[in-house]
Amino acid sequence: MRGARGVINDLPGWVAAILIGVLTIVDGVWALSLWCARTVVRARGIAVVGVVRARKWAWPDSQDIVVETDSSPPRQRVRLCDSQGRKTTLPHVGERHLPDLHALRPR
């Protein structure tokens, strides 16, 4: 009977190197997307800027900004509801920022 060996030990060296390289790149892109994501609020509207793309909404295109609570793990997310009913999470925006967001929104 064979001894208990890890899965990585059963792969050829070149396959293991490619697998480790791909996982490193994926983890790096994921970490970069979390680090670079931001919410930009201006008099014209609101934008969510990420590594790959920026999504923008004029104030008339946004219906509401709501706080949603996830149960596991318990945390709150601030989300923008647009005029088409879609919800988008606003990165780095907390419940304490809501008065400032509503103050910038034109009446």
Image (cartoon, rainbow, N blue to C red):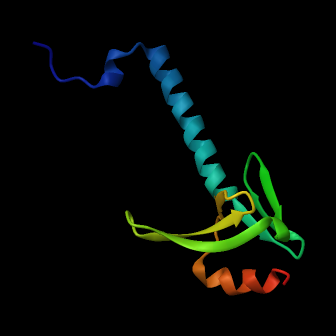
Q: Nearer the viewer, residue 72 or 59?
A: 59
Q: Nearer the viewer, residue 77 or 52?
A: 77
Q: Residue at x 15, y 19 (%)?
A: 3
Instruction: Tell me the quadrant of the picture where the N terminus can be found.
Output: top left
Q: Residue furthest left?
A: 1
Question: Residue 104, percent across and down?
Answer: 81, 82
Residue 82, located in which quarter of the rendered image? bottom right
Q: Residue at x 76, y 67 (%)?
A: 62
Question: Residue 39, percent across and down?
Answer: 73, 66
Instruction: Tell me the quadrant of the picture where the C terminus can be found.
Output: bottom right
Depicted 107 relative to depicted 82: above or below? below
Question: Residue 6, percent across and down?
Answer: 27, 25
Q: Residue furthest right?
A: 44
Q: Residue at x 49, y 29 (%)?
A: 20
Depicted 72 relative to depicted 41: above or below? above
Question: Residue 67, percent across and down?
Answer: 56, 74
Q: Residue at x 81, y 62 (%)?
A: 57
Image position of 58 (left or right of 12)? right
